[in-house]
Image: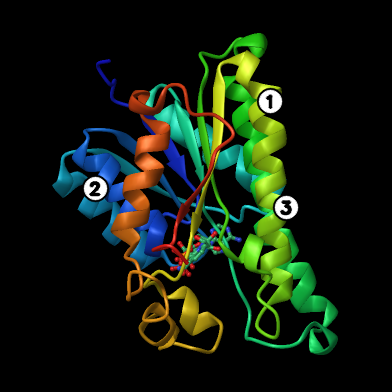
């Protein structure tokens, strides 16, 4: 099968896994809407890297948990590149490690708003625009879950693991709901990957330290996760739907 150049929206595309996905898409000659929450400099660096790789990109500021922002980021991507083929539902946050009994309400709200509500709103917007039943051309959605969804992350961040369990369920349900409408929906479940996210959990050395405990003996890179995500969006994976693909070094 000959793969066609895609236009995708990557939420949280400014840093980490989202940045690696954007750059790999650029290497394929794809066009990318690079969404970010507040880090304009990082987003512009990603855009430049996509251009250098051979693709097209624009930076789009917006909070995935705000409905109007989500609509605007889809509009901006379609306006810039004339079409949309896929969504990488990647934006996600974690908070400092703690027992659930010690987690304040505000933390839980922020985490669930970003990781669950944000992902659901973005998936809804993609469904509205891509569904063949609604006049779209079909496409793909890749959701960022985590191995935390099956490990549970006790004494670390049960709230985060819970949010990723919701992403697995969203993926399974939507793959069945949208498959008949021309949209394949899959999830990638990374293990411990070298990005900034560990610093936001108060453990900047987490990837280095815990990576060693994975069967492959090291943390993964954002680029290794990006390979799986781009494959799931590409025509090469045309019969893959509803998969929860672990990219976790066997963890
Ligand atoms: P990261 O390096 O911390 O980057 C997070 C990205 O999300 C940034 O681009 C950030 O934008 C954006 N973002 C945060 N809140 C947002 C919001 N409300 N609206 C829009 N964008 C927002 O994270 P990462 O490690 O690449 O993680 C990416 C995804 O993979 C997440 O869903 C995470 O849960 C999942 N994951 C990561 C690991 C890991 O070990 N790294 C493991 C399993 C799963 P700014 O740059 O503007 O702040």
SS for callout 2: helix
Q: Residue at x 80, y 82 (%)?
A: 100
| Residue that lies at the very extreme toward the front in this rendered image | 215
Check disc 1 and report its element: helix, strand or loop: helix
Could you tell me how far apart the alpha carbons at marks 2 and 1 are, in whole angstroms?
A: 33 Å
Residue at image mark 2: 50
For marks 3 and 2, give the one nearer the viewer: 3
The location of residue 135, given as percent across then percent down, is: 61, 9
Which image quarter: residue 194?
bottom left
Please say if 191 is above or below 32.
below
> In what element is the residue under mark 3?
helix
Marks 3 and 1, the one that precedes in the sequence: 3
* Number of marks drawn: 3
**Which disc is residue 166 wearing?**
3
Tell me if I can see residue 193 in this picture: yes
Identify the disc placed on residue 176: 1
Is residue 14 visible in the rendered structure shown here?
Answer: no
What residue sits 68% from the left and 25% below the top?
176
Q: What residue is at 64 percent from the left and 33 percent from the top? A: 125
Q: Residues within 10 Å of mark 1 (few under 14, many from 20)?
A: some
Q: Quadrant of residue 132?
A: top right
Image location (x, y in percent) of residue 212 = 36, 81
Q: Are marks 3 and 2 in contact (CB under 8 Å)?
A: no
Residue 57 on image: x %, y %: 31, 42
Tell whether circle 2 marks a residue whose Cβ is less than 8 angstroms from ligand 1.
no
Label 2: few (<14), some (14–19) or many (≥20) C-alpha neighbours in 10 Å? many
For the residues marked 3 and 2, what is the alpha-carbon distance in whole angstroms?
31 Å
């Amino acid at each position: 099968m000959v793969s066609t150049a895609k236009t995708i929206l990557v939420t949280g595309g400014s840093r980490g896994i989202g940045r690696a996905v954007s750059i790999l898409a650029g290497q394929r000659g794809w066009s990318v809407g690079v969404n970010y929450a507040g880090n304009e400099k990082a987003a512009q660096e990603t855009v430049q890297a996509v251009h250098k790789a051979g693709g097209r990109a624009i930076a789009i500021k917006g909070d995935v948990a705000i409905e109007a922002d989500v609509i605007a980021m889809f509009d901006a991507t379609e306006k810039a590149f004339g079409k949309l083929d896929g969504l990488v539902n990647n934006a996600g946050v974690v908070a400092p490690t703690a027992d659930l009994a010690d987690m304040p309400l505000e933390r839980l709200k922020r985490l669930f708003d970003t990781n669950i509500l944000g992902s659901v709103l973005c998936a809804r917007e993609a469904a509205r625009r891509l569904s063949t039943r609604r006049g779209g051309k079909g496409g793909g959605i890749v959701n960022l879950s985590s191995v935390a969804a099956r490990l549970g992350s006790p004494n670390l961040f049960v709230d985060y693991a819970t949010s990723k369990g919701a992403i697995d369920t969203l993926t399974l349900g939507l793959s069945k709901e949208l498959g008949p409408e021309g949209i394949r929906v899959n999830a990638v479940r990374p293990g411990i990957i070298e990005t900034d996210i560990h610093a936001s959990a108060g453990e900047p050395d987490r990837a280095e330290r815990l990576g060693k405990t994975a069967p492959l003996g090291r943390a993964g890179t954002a680029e290794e996760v990006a390979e799986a995500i781009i494959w799931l969006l590409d025509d090469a994976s045309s019969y893959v739907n509803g998969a929860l693909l672990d990219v976790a070094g066997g963890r």
